[in-house]
Amino acid sequence: MSGNLEKIKRSYACSAAGDLPGILQDFSEEGVWTDMAGGPHSGRFTGPKEVLKHVFGGSIGEWDRFACVPEEYFEDVDRNVVVMVGHYEGIHRITRRSMWVRTAHLWRFEGGRIVSYEQFADTKLLWDAVTPAAEGGGPHA
């Protein structure tokens, strides 16, 4: 197992413990975080400060008992890439709707630092959880 895989596993352990700065301790200042297009909080954010503000300070705070649960990891040491496959779970604080959404995260490294993160998830299921039931789910319902 490489140091890159260990760093990603540590990041998810920090997430489970609620250690938000720890999640990004190996994220480059120029690193780009991309949340899936079409989702309720999609976007591209550069550097740990922007990610903490827009991802962990914004969308994650909307959930009770939010968790990203890793199930499998895959690594390509020649390309400096780690992939996590798992799921999200939680209850939205406003709608009280629960979610369980499969996800995959693609992490790229340069010089031992994370230079990009890309999320893949079913955005319809995310919209269904954040949209009040009277509105019938998200824009893709």
Image (cartoon, grey):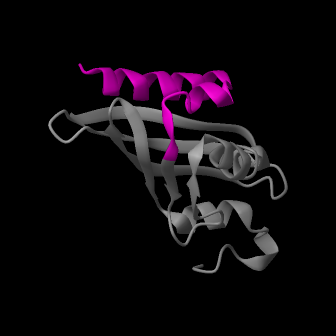
Q: Residue 136's quadrant in the figure?
A: bottom right
Q: Residue 108's quadrant in the figure?
A: top left
Above or below 17: residue 44: below
Question: In terms of depth relative to the viewer, which is nearer, 126 or 26?
Answer: 26
Q: Is residue 33 magenta?
A: no
Q: Position of residue 103 (x, y in %)?
A: 44, 50
Q: Position of residue 101 (x, y in %)?
A: 51, 52
Q: Is residue 26 magenta?
A: yes
Residue at screen point 49% across, 52% down: 32
Question: In terms of depth relative to the viewer, which is nearer, 31 or 2?
Answer: 31
| 7 to the left or right of 127 | left
Q: Position of residue 133 (x, y in %)?
A: 77, 69
Question: Quadrant where the N terminus lies?
Answer: top left
The single residue placed furthest to the right in the displayed view is 94
Q: Which residues are magenta?
A: 1-30
SS assignment for the magenta stretch, majority: helix
Q: Position of residue 9 (x, y in %)?
A: 42, 24
Above or below 33: residue 38: below
Residue at screen point 53% across, 58% down: 35
Q: Residue 16's quadrant in the figure?
A: top right
| 10 to the left or right of 51 | left
